[in-house]
Amino acid sequence: MNLRDATNTDLEITYRIKSNSIKPYVEKIWSWDEQFQKKTHETNFTASDTKIIERNRKEVGYLVLKETLDEIFIENLLIEKEFQNLGIGKAVMEKIIERANSEKKLIRLQVFKINIKAQKFYENLGFEKNSETENHIGMKKNWLTKN
């Protein structure tokens, strides 16, 4: 597995990964409007915040981080459906957790309420639920928390 910096040419790749990973959840919550999703993705895509996850030289996922002095916010960690459950997401998260611990930073993220699998994934990495909205669960992991 390799993480590489995204470039502006990765817009289509990241949209494909997004579609192949979270579309079923978005469809259940709001419905999936292809034109709206593409436009929103184009508007929100920031290459400088994005890492492309590669496995055997194939783009299989992407990671979007927003950082401050004392926090890492994971905006997205998306792995294409066919590459899920292979340990790729866990390996990426372990690197983030290791860095957050060494820099004494809090890690925050949110997941869809209906994505129980993702909630369990993060709980197994030591994250705890700390907020809730109509469609999302907020989770955090403090660098002091061992797991």
Image (cartoon, helix red, strand yellow):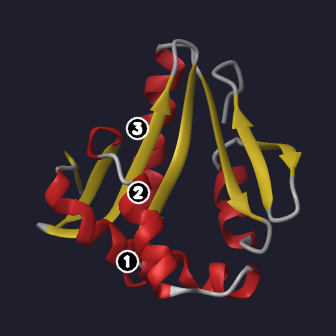
Q: Which disc is residue 43 wearing?
A: 2
Within 10 Å of disc 1 (Cα), the crowding (few <14, some 14-19, many 20+) is some
Q: Which residue is mark 3?
A: 95
Distance CA(mark 3)–CA(mark 2): 28 Å
- Residue at image coords 33%, 78%: 16
- Residue at image coords 49%, 75%: 37
Q: Which residue is mark 1?
A: 83
Choose the circle earlier in sequence order: 1 or 3: 1
Q: Position of residue 97 (x, y in %)?
A: 51, 33
- Relative to 74, residue 146 above or below: above
- Relative to 103, residue 67 above or below: below
Q: Is residue 127 visible?
A: yes
Within 10 Å of disc 3 (Cα), the crowding (few <14, some 14-19, many 20+) is few
Q: Amino acid at mark 3?
A: Lys
- Residue at image coords 58%, 14%: 70
Distance CA(mark 1)–CA(mark 2): 26 Å
Query: Disc 3 or disc 2, which is closer to the eye?
Result: 2
Disc 1 + disc 3, Cβ < 8 Å: no
- Relative to 118, residue 146 above or below: above
